[in-house]
Amino acid sequence: MTPRAFKSARFEGREVRVTGLNKGLQKIEVALKWDPSPLGEPPHDLDIVAGTYRAADPYGAPAYLVHFDSRSPDGTINLNRDSRTGQGLGTDESMTLELERLSPEYARVVVGITIQQGSGRKTFGDVPNTSVRILNGYTELMTSDFTGVSEATSATVAVFTRDDAGEWGIQSAIRGFDADPEGFGQLMGKDYS
């Protein structure tokens, strides 16, 4: 499969900046859930992926990726829960991003979801009740059910950027890709505007 961004993908570009007495976005939780596959069928295995990009090259290759069974080198981005089946109640996968601790060397973090393709091609439309929720503490920043990218095998969901004052903001960025997990990691941070 040649990885590619969908030409007809839906892209939501809502910018969220936390202002006032708050210190911007700090500790983010990305929560992913989906229904398990029917009995006798191969399991649905979805993964949260975060790519961190250097301020000197915010749309280049990721400095590092955090995904299943990994964490960032400095411990600021961690996958806390990893499901390979979607079984259980509530959140199936969870990732924490401690943006306030991320080195000033990094100015952009892209978060996406990808579907493992080991048992044949699966899209978001093939996996029932898939949803992602992003929180800053107890404040919900965004949710998505992937309806707009149902034919995709991977999708970006949010882009976190650091401004000149060092404050982090989030842009909802639902964009579908026809890419396996490895290819998606290299595509997710490109500039598609």
Image (spheres, rainbow, N blue to C red):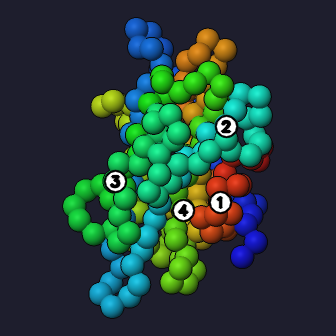
Amino acid type indicated by mark 1: Phe
Q: Residue furthest top?
A: 21
The residue identified by callout 1 is 184
Q: CA distance from mark 2 to mark 3?
A: 23 Å
Which residue was labeled with disc 3?
Answer: 81
Answer with mark 4 or mark 3, whichever residue precedes in sequence. 3
Q: Earlier in the sequence, mark 2 or mark 3?
A: 2
| Residue where numbered disc 2 is placed | 53
Answer with left or right where residue 85 lies relative to residue 175: left
C-alpha gap between disc 4 and disc 3: 15 Å
Amino acid at the residue labelled 3: Arg
Q: Is residue 125 above or below residue 57?
A: below
Callout 4: few (<14), some (14-19), or many (20+) C-alpha neighbours within 10 Å?
many
Q: Of discs 4 and 3, which sits in the foreground? A: 3
- Quadrant that contains the N terminus: bottom right
Contact check, label 1 and label 4, Cβ < 8 Å: yes
Q: Residue 93, position in %: x, y?
A: 37, 55
Residue appearing at x 59%, y 64% in the figure: 181
Mark 1 and mark 4 lie on one chain; the one further toward the N terminus is: 4
